Amino acid sequence: MISGIARKETPAEAKVRIGDERLLKVSVDAGNKVRSLLDRQGRPEGVLRVAVVGGGCSGLQYKMDLQDAPAHRDILVESGGIRVVVDPKTALYVTGSQLDYADKLEDGGFKVNNPNAASTCSCGESFSA
């Protein structure tokens, strides 16, 4: 509060915890792809948000989004030459995971190798923990 006026928190002032690659590791290929996407969108200082949300055949699925900056309470990890953010709830599901990228026609794109996944669906797009 400044002079009795409530002030909105800016992204630079957001309370962010720093994590490391034990939370989430990004492969070189995935880092290069994310960096090129951020550059193409004009967000060279942006972050990749990885989230776990309800849905899919097995109950949980990954959601990835490019954003300008971390949000309040995010955990920030620098890996693969990029900055990745996860919220505290997602951190419970992705600890120890690796984000990979393959530029292939079949079975290409981003893949999360998650040691916490108890099972995955046949299409590989969702998991249960």
Image (spheres, rainbow, N blue to C red):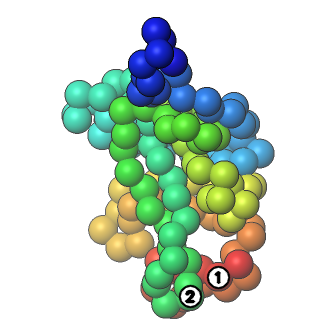
Marking on residue 116? none
Tell whether 120 sits left or right of 62.
right
Is residue 52 depicted above or below 34 in this figure?
Answer: below
Task: Kindly identify the amino acid type of the residue bearing the numbered disc 2.
Answer: Ser
- Residue extending farthest front: 4
- The quarter of the image holding the C terminus is bottom right
- Of mark 2 and mark 1, the one earlier in the sequence is 2
Number of residues whose C-alpha sits closer than 10 Å to that of mark 2, classed few (under 14), some (14–19) or many (20 or more): some
Residue at (54, 29) in percent of width and height:
14
Residue 108 horizontal/vertical position (percent): 39, 65
- In-image side of 30 versus 42 (left or right): right
Q: Position of residue 91 (x, y in %)?
A: 68, 55
* The one of 45 and 71 positioned closer to us in this rendering: 71
The span from disc 2 to disc 1 (Cα, nearest Å) is 5 Å
Tell me the residue at 56%/53% (across/down). Answer: 99
In the shown orientation, is residue 19 left or right of residue 112?
Answer: right
Inspect this view and state whether residue 1 appears: yes
User: Residue 115 appears at what percent x and percent y?
Assistant: 74, 67
Which structural element holds mark 2?
loop
In the displayed structure, would residue 32 be above or below residue 106? Answer: above
| 52 to 77, vertically: above or below | below
The reply to whether callout 2 and callout 1 are in contact (CB within 8 Å) is yes
Task: Please name the residue that numbered disc 1 is placed on.
Answer: 128
Q: Can residue 94 be seen at all in this image of the molecule?
A: no
Query: Which residue is at 47% across, 81% downward?
Result: 55
Up-down: is 29 above or below 59?
above
Q: Amino acid at mark 1?
A: Ser
Q: At 30% across and 40% down in the image, what residue appears?
A: 37
Residue corresponding to mark 2: 58
